[in-house]
Image (cartoon, rainbow, N blue to C red):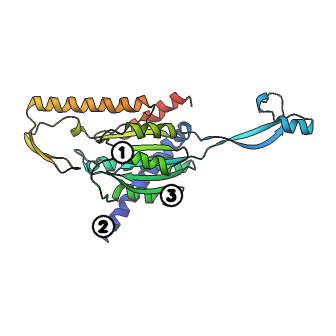
Amino acid sequence: MNDTREILRKIRRLELRTRRLVASSFAGQYQSVFKGRGMNFEEVRPYSPGDEIRAIDWNVTARTGEPYIKKFTEEREMTVMIVLDVSASGNFGSVEESKRELAAEVAAILAFSAITNNDKVGLLLFSDRVELFIPPKKGRLHILRLIREMLFFRPKGKGTDLSGTLEYLNKVVTRRAVVFLISDFLTGDFSKPLTISAKRHDMVAIPVIDPAEEMLPDVGVILLEDPETGEQIEVDTSRRVLSKGYAEMAEKRSKELFSLFGARRIDTLPLRTDKDYLPVLRSFFDRRGRRIGS
């Protein structure tokens, strides 16, 4: 019972925090940078001077003997999919917040921004398998369920399989969607299904980074364990050659990852457990807004 109350309190705190941020900062920006799928025909009306000639409905015009134009409205409603990595490496955090907690908070902001703009939101949790798929829906209670799963779902798998996850996404989400792919991307090659997903959907890659994954702290001899495989290794972090090699390997991997996204014209929103995500999120919306000319 105590665990249940604590879970509900945590969900409620996260809801209050993220909804305030959405109301004050992100709902309008979200609407301006994530567009609907196209234009819906609404009606025909008499032509007025200054109307676009290409909008004239020639069939109605011929039938009535008076010029009429077609009126369209933007199809605003979209489908948003949050694809979230819940593998064991997400539980890691060398500072106050784990990668999974950070990912859930930012995903909650995106989800509340979406329903504020009348979009549907779905969730796909994955590890080395697809763990959970919740179809897109609207409404506050639906979003609270997604938040609960993002924070507290207990996966069966420990590893990470992005290829299988993206293949599954491509099968179950057949209409174009905005896809927020949130992971530390500590996995093998997933370029082929990513290419297909990027063509079908408006994808945003959100790498979640912890500083200890970029540079080893100098704390002497420590035992490192891979949370996904359980493999352990003893290392002397005071050895400069070791620390330098570790940092170079992390930098190389980061460059390859961002090159992979850039080649497929996928927007990126990198998050760090040691930095406030709000400036990064605002910068992302501004950058995307400039790119699409909103």
**Neighbourhood count class around disc 2 (C-alpha, 10 Å): few under 14, some 14–19, many 20 upward:** few
- The mark that comes first in sequence, 2 or 1, is 2
Whichever of labels 2 and 3 marks the residue nearer the N terminus, that label is 2
Residue 11's spot in the image, x, y percent? 39, 58
Q: To which quarter of the image does residue 283 belong? A: top left
Identify the disc placed on residue 162.
Answer: 1
Which residue lies at the image location 16% right of the left edge and 30% below the top edge? Answer: 245
Q: Amino acid at mark 1?
A: Leu
Can residue 23 be seen in the rendering of this structure? yes
Is 255 placed left or right of 168 in the picture? left
Callout 3 crowding tier (Cα within 10 Å): few <14, some 14–19, many ≥20: some
Q: Do callouts 2 and 3 mark residues in contact (Cβ within 8 Å)?
A: no
Secondary structure of the residue carrying numbered label 2: helix
Element on which disc 1 rests: helix
Identify the residue position indicated by label 2 in the image: 3
Q: Residue 138 or 201: which is nearer the viewer?
A: 201
Which of pointers 1 and 3 lies earlier in the amino acid sequence? 3
Instruction: Name the quadrant containing residue 293.
Output: top right
**Relative to residue 94, is residue 141 drawn left or right?**
right
Q: CA distance from mark 2 to mark 1?
A: 32 Å
Q: Secondary structure at mark 3?
A: helix
Residue sitting nearer the eye, 124 or 276: 124
In 3D space, how far apart are the residues under numbered discs 2 and 3 (Cα atoms)? 23 Å
Quick one: label 1, few (<14), some, or many (20+) residues within 10 Å? many
Residue type, numbered disc 2:
Asp
Amino acid type of the residue tagged 3 in the rendering: Arg
Q: CA distance from mark 1 to mark 3?
A: 29 Å
Q: Residue at x 41, y 56 (%)?
A: 147
Residue depth check, mark 1 versus mark 3: number of the one nearer the observer? 1
Judge whether residue 52 can be spotted in this image. Answer: no
Mark 3 = which residue? Answer: 140
